[in-house]
Amino acid sequence: MSIGYRELASELRDAIKAGVYAPDTTLPKQEDLKAQYGVNIKTIREAIRVLEAEGLVTPVRRRGTVVRSRPPMKRLGIERYAKSKWKFGLVAFAADREASGREWQPGDQTNATRRVEADAEVAEAYGLMAGAPVYERARLVKDGGVPTHTLTSYYRPEHVEGTPLVDPKPGPAGAGGGFAVLTLQGLEPETVTETFHARMPTPDEMEQLELPAGEPVMVLQRQTFTRDGQLVEFARGVHSASRFSWTYTFKMPD
């Protein structure tokens, strides 16, 4: 009895997880799968679409159906923002890399800075009128040449004008990154609030992050405050869901 596409997808999924088809190798050709499982080409294509939507495989022109490499990096929680790290030159994304046993280079992060009008969300966070001027600092971060996430921060002009935070040079904004720069401005970060949600990516995000069809993204909103509660950074990030495992260690409150 011939199996359906869901059953075939399950067979192939189990084989991928068992290592029968290793990361960055290709699945057998459709004709070979047809002979092996006794199914028609339509069933094979539908099964492959299921695996593609799950982020397990990616069709690559002239190669075939390639099994995706899934080496999730640790995305640390409070530890990535430890002052003992950024005060001595280790920025947050680099702290994640080191915790994951990965090397990093300053060029792994691009920068694009410009003065823009605050949108409604940024304006509300800062207590400004919509359209008030803010500085936008947009970054694309890569690991081994593959995009992992974007992060776009917004600052009040009086906090960052004339500092490395408005310098478009690739890489972190000097040793310690943006938090160190804010500290030198008398605005030392003390508290961070992060909010996450998952959704499907926009077409632009799919292109920028080089996402396969069907892979969701994790969307971050970060607000950074000084000890006296002043907001000094409002940031939004979009993360490829398969590139990170999210790790949090904390003391349970009373």
Image (cartoon, rainbow, N blue to C red):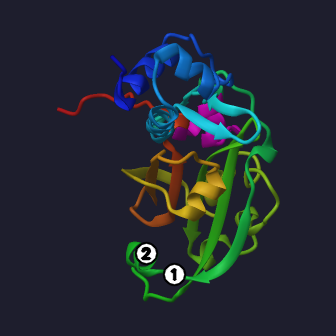
- Tell me which residue sits at (69%, 26%) in the image: 102
In the visual, does 219 lie left or right of 210? left
Q: Quadrant of residue 77?
A: top left
137 over 201 or under it: above or below = below
| Mark positioned earlier in the residue sequence (2 or 1) | 1
Residue 169 appears in view: yes
- Tell me which residue sits at (53%, 22%) in the image: 34
The residue lying toward the viewer, choosing from 163 and 35, is: 35
Q: Are marks 2 and 1 in contact (CB under 8 Å)?
A: yes
User: Residue 103, how many percent across, how many down?
Assistant: 74, 28
User: Residue 121, how many percent across, how many down?
Assistant: 41, 74
In the visual, does 254 lie left or right of 140? left
Residue labelled with disc 2: 126
Q: Quadrant of residue 250?
A: top left
Q: Amino acid at mark 2?
A: Tyr
98 over 138 or under it: above or below = above
Q: Quadrant of the C terminus?
A: top left
The numbered mark at residue 118 is 1
Rounded to the nearest whole Å, what is the CA distance between mark 2 and mark 1?
9 Å
The residue lying toward the viewer, choosing from 101 and 84, is: 101
What predominant SS class does the magenta segment belong to? Answer: helix
> Mark 2 packing: few (<14 Cα in 10 Å), some, or many (20+)?
some
Span shown in magenta: 80-97
The residue lying toward the viewer, choosing from 101 and 193, is: 101
User: Residue 118, how many percent across, how many down?
Assistant: 51, 81
